[in-house]
Image: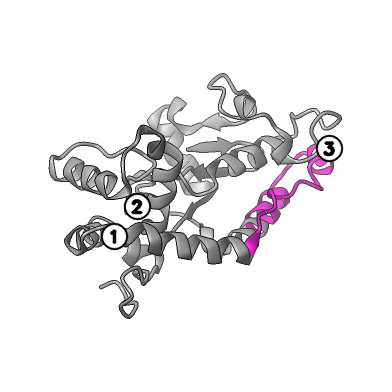
Amino acid sequence: MYYDDDMDYIYCLVGKVSCTSWKRTLMMLSGKIDRARFRRPEQLPIGMVHDHRNSYVSRVETLPQAERAWRFDRYFTFLFVREPLERLVSAYRNKVRRYNVTFAEFVRFVLDERAGGRVLDRHWCPQSELCRVCRHRYDFVGHHESLQRDARHVIDELKSRTADPERRRRVADVAFPASDGDGHRRKSGELVRQMYAQVPSEHLHALYRLYAVDYALFGFRHPNVTGLRTIRSA
């Protein structure tokens, strides 16, 4: 989780939900980036973004517990979530596929890890567990499916909370990195159906159970990956 004591926010990072773009954007909104070198968030080098010595954004876990608590009570808190099965495909393609593992084998691995009581990697752990949504209050939950609209809302909120007028002026033109919008959504839906075509139905239903809280809390519907009618989560 990241926080800022000038804009008074806490952001819970969820792997495979545009988290790198969000970190880039928050770095730009800090007002500390040299705007002569970097005009847009997407121009920030990936090594700079993922450097653990990064001084542009602060991590909540570095704070004593008492200081975390009062910030959660007073700050604007937000996270972004993604349809669980689509997020799992994205994690596989980005983190696992290069190891010559099939998607069906990866699904079986995730289910076996959960059944064995082991902690799941943050890129496919249920989003509700990553951000402890039953413990913490969140003011805004954005969706990857409406990323650009929801991101604009959050960025406008953060800019409005910037106390320092000079900083507010420096970051006035900061915007979330552009995406290919509807075209991406269509391609993503087609890819999800293709990937799950090789997954046994019992494993698919086990995934629904694994991500049941995500489906219930965040309003997702089970995607139509089997050619059957899409069903609502219980």
Quadrant in which residue 197 is drawn: bottom left
Q: Give the magenta-colored segment's residue range.
A: 153-181
Please provide percent x and percent y for residue 69.
42, 40
Quadrant in which residue 48 is drawn: top right
Tags 2 and 1 touching, CB below 8 Å: yes
165 in the magenta segment: yes
Residue at mark 1: 213
Residue found 57% across the figure and 22% down from its top: 51
**Pick the front one: 136 or 202:** 202
Residue 195, placed above or below residue 170:
below
Q: Nearer the viewer, mark 2 or mark 3?
A: 2
Label 1 Cα neighbours within 10 Å, binned few <14 / some 14-19 / many ≥20: some
Residue 194, placed above or below residue 60:
below
134 in the magenta segment: no
Residue found 24% across the figure and 37% down from its top: 119
Residue at mark 2: 128
Label 3 Cα neighbours within 10 Å, binned few <14 / some 14-19 / many ≥20: few
